[in-house]
Image (cartoon, helix red, strand yellow):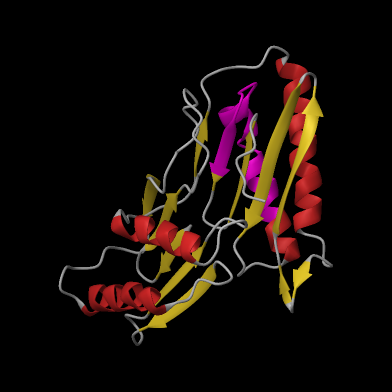
Amino acid sequence: MLSIFGSVHILAVVAIQLLIIPSVSSLNLTNAYLHHKCNNTEGKYSYGSAFEKYINLALRAMDSDNFLNGFGFIERGEDPNKVFVMYQCRGDSYGSKCQSCISAAVSGIDYENDFYLSNPKNVNDKELFNKETSALLVELTNKATDKNNMVGNQFVLYAAGEKRIGTKNVYAMVQCTKDLVTTTCAACFEWIFKMFSKCCDGKRGGRVLGTSCNFRYELYPFLRN
């Protein structure tokens, strides 16, 4: 997840996935670029402008980051052309895995807010599956936003788990960017969960990715231990 703040807001999303599972369209098997959106409510910058210069400087500064905790915030330039770049990798991805993910995002960078992906195949019992999957996501949200869920002096704002639903195991994760606190992270989840019925109604897998939070579930284990 990569965001740039200034006159232009950016969300670029990539997937890290080591499992090779054929015919699952909701899964990207490499660090493939997934999607972008642009929010130009504050206007567009001009090519060759100071703002573009500082964007490039900020992105280049990411090359020297060690990506150890999977999160970074970089500032370059002076008002009114100051640029802030924020990135965050999935909770199980850090170090070189995070670096390759962010490199993929930067290479395909563009700008905007949230989107969703889902598996085209449906489960047999939609009502039960939707109810129990939603309950799992709420349970993980409570874990992710627990004030005791900290590393050092920073909130983790991430949780992953699994649940048996009928004859299937469902694997899921939730995550907020680390510029949030527990209350604002919970509010972000509440907002994107409203997209569940639109994206994921009875689907075998789905995810919603926003600028500040995201969730994902699948019928196969997609996270590294």
Question: In x, y percent, where is residue 213?
Answer: 60, 54
Residue at the extreme right: 148
Pick whichever, 53 or 221, lies toward us.
221
- Is 57 left or right of 205, judged from the image as shown? left
* Total numbered circles: 0
Residue at the (51%, 37%) spot, across then down: 116
Using the image, determine if residue 172 lies above or below residue 200. Answer: below
Residue at the (74%, 32%) spot, across then down: 133
Q: Give the residues drawn in magenta, as a range.
A: 187-208
Residue at the (81%, 45%) spot, across then down: 139
Say which quarter of the image contains residue 68: bottom right
Using the image, determine if residue 225 lies above or below residue 162. Answer: below
Residue at the extreme bottom: 78
Question: In x, y percent, where is residue 92?
Answer: 61, 56
Question: In x, y percent, where is residue 105?
Answer: 37, 56
Residue at the extreme left: 48
Q: Is residue 199 magenta?
A: yes
Q: Is residue 225 magenta?
A: no
Pick whichever, 23 or 217, lies toward us.
23
- Is 13 left or right of 123, judged from the image as shown? left
Question: In x, y percent, where is residue 58?
Answer: 35, 76
Say which quarter of the image contains residue 147: bottom right
Pick whichever, 183 or 208, lies toward us.
208
